[in-house]
Each structure stands twice: as C-alpha cells, then as structure tokens.
Amino acid sequence: MTLQQVDTAPNRSRHTSTRVMAILQLCLAFCLLMWVLAGPFMAEYFSYRSSLLLYEAVMGRDATKATNDKDLRNAERFAALPQHRRLRVARAYDNLEASGEKTFAAKSIEALEAIFVDLPMFTQAWMLLSIVIGILLLKRRDGARAAAWILPLLALAYSADNIYRGTRDAGAPDAALFPSEQHLVTQYLEEPLSKEVAQQRDQLMGAWHRYLVTEWAKEPIASNTEVFVAQVQRGEHSFHVARLEKRLDAQEQPGSHRFPRQSRSILFLYVLWNIFFAYMVNRRGA
C-alpha cells in the first residue's frame, strides 16, 4: 500500500467537513437573503392586515357593510370625534389602503432597496462574502480558506456597530397603553384568581372589561348587563382610538434606517459561529 493510498481516506474526510461547513454557511447567507427579500411581501402583508382591523374597530363600517350593531355604534362614535381627529385617521386609512394595493413590481423594488439600501453595510458584506467564499470552497479554489477569516472580522465589526450605534427597540408604539396583568388583578378583579386556566381567562376578561369601563369610558360600572355591555363597547372604542393615534404619532416622527439593537447573546453566537466556520475550513489538512 502506497503513502498516497494511506492518506486518501483522512483527506477525503477533511474535504467532506469543509464542504459541509461551506454548505451550512451558504444556507445561512441565503436564508438571510430570502428573509429580507420577503419583507415587502409577507411581513408587510401581516402588518397591513393587523392595522386594517384596528382602523375598522375605530371607524366602524358603512351601514351597508355592517355585520352587527357594534359596527354601527363604532361608526357613530367615530363620527362624534372632533373633526381634526377624524380627518387624521381618515387620511391615514386612505394611505393604508393604497399601500395594500401595491403591485408586484413595486414590492420587488422595495425588496431590492431593503437589500442594497436599508441593510447595514457590514451585513451586506457578510452576506455577499459568505456566498462567494462558500462557492469557492466547494470548488476548492486557492485562497478561499484564508478568505474565510474575513467573515469573523465582519461579524465583529457588525456587532460593535450594532451595540454602540443600533437603535433601541421600543416595541409597539401602543404597548404602553395596555395594563399589566398584575394591575388588572389588583385593581379590577372582584375575587381571588383561580388556579384553573380556563377560569382564569374568564376572570381576567371580566377584569379587562371593568378596566375599559372605568379607565376609558370614564363611567361607573353598571349592574345591568345590557348597559354594562354598551359601556364596555364605548371604553373599547376609546382605547382603540388612543392606540391608533399612538401609532400615527410614531409614524410621523423622523425614522431611522438603522436596524434595532440586537441582544448581546445573539451577537456573541453570530461571531462565534463565524470564528468556528473559519477555523474548521482552515484547520490543518482540511
């Protein structure tokens, strides 16, 4: 048996590990690419649908489209709002409907802008080099393994930039309007919270309704069931109006094109993977 034959098996194994790492890196890069490209199509669609439901809860529906008495009452409550508030909501609703009618070409342009304009520079470079280096590794081109060390450097640069310059994710603009469960339990629950999950749901829903009546309808809680239901609907409508106006305030503020700040644990794993990838494809005999 010759020396070349002895070395064939371990060398084949090392080449296989390099190919596996290259394929994994390509998968990560293409997953990120698809995620960003899908934003104007999928993420925007779900955002559009949820916003549409909130507008319908505030504006009600036309009499010809109303499915129940609540829709008609909400339309009347919206009509009773001050004119400047109604016009602001109506204009925003028209803009929302227009955004829902974007053509495939318009969304495709937005997807390309998300890749080439909105995506952080270090992420763009990492994604491009991950694809190029991964393909060169599969083709066993000279210099591809050494070039893999660029990826951990880009990951470190992105992490530092994200930590020191990334924007804090404040969450949904209307999140602060929602009361905590503890507040509902201590202020609006009329009995001790049950240990049964199904009963807890009913208790918390009752506390939520009493909260709407007290805090948003600004009325004393009625003992009559029909009157109480009407009070809940008035409080719910006022609450939804406040939610919508919070969202409109956030939309009118100057935005930032930077991505929100990521958790340090996620950034650590991101850097660690790229170091591991570069090490695996550069280890002796790989």
Image (spheres, helix red, strand yellow):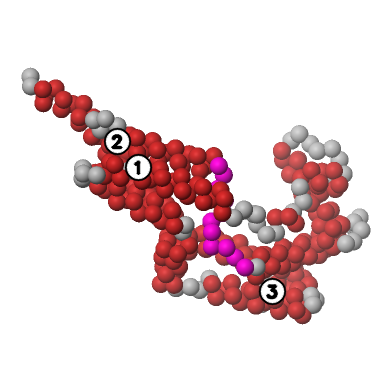
Crowd tier of the residue under label 3, counting other residues whose Cα lies within 10 Å: few below 14, some 14–19, many 20 or above: many
* Disc 2 to disc 1, C-alpha distance: 9 Å
Residue 36 counted in the magenta span: no
Q: Residue 121, position in %: x, y?
A: 44, 57
Give the numbered dot on residue 89.
Answer: 3
Q: Residue 66, position in %: x, y?
A: 68, 72
Tag 1 or tag 2, which sits nearer the N-term?
Answer: 1
Look at 76% across and 47% down and name the residue there.
180
Could you say whether the residue bearing mark 1 is in a helix, strand or loop? loop
Look at 30% across and 45% down and name the residue there.
147
Look at 79% across and 43% down and name the residue there.
182
Drawn side of residue 160 relative to residue 137, left or right: right
Residue at numbered disc 2 = 282
Identity of the residue furthest to the top in this view:
1
Q: Main secondary structure of the magenta part?
A: loop
Look at 71% across and 67% down and name the residue there.
245
Q: Amino acid at mark 2?
A: Asn
Q: Assess whether mark 1 and mark 2 are in contact (beta carbons under 8 angstroms).
A: yes
Q: Amino acid at mark 1?
A: Trp
Residue at numbered disc 1 = 149
Range of residues picked out in magenta: 254-264
Residue 259 counted in the magenta span: yes
Tag 3 or tag 2, which sits nearer the N-term?
Answer: 3
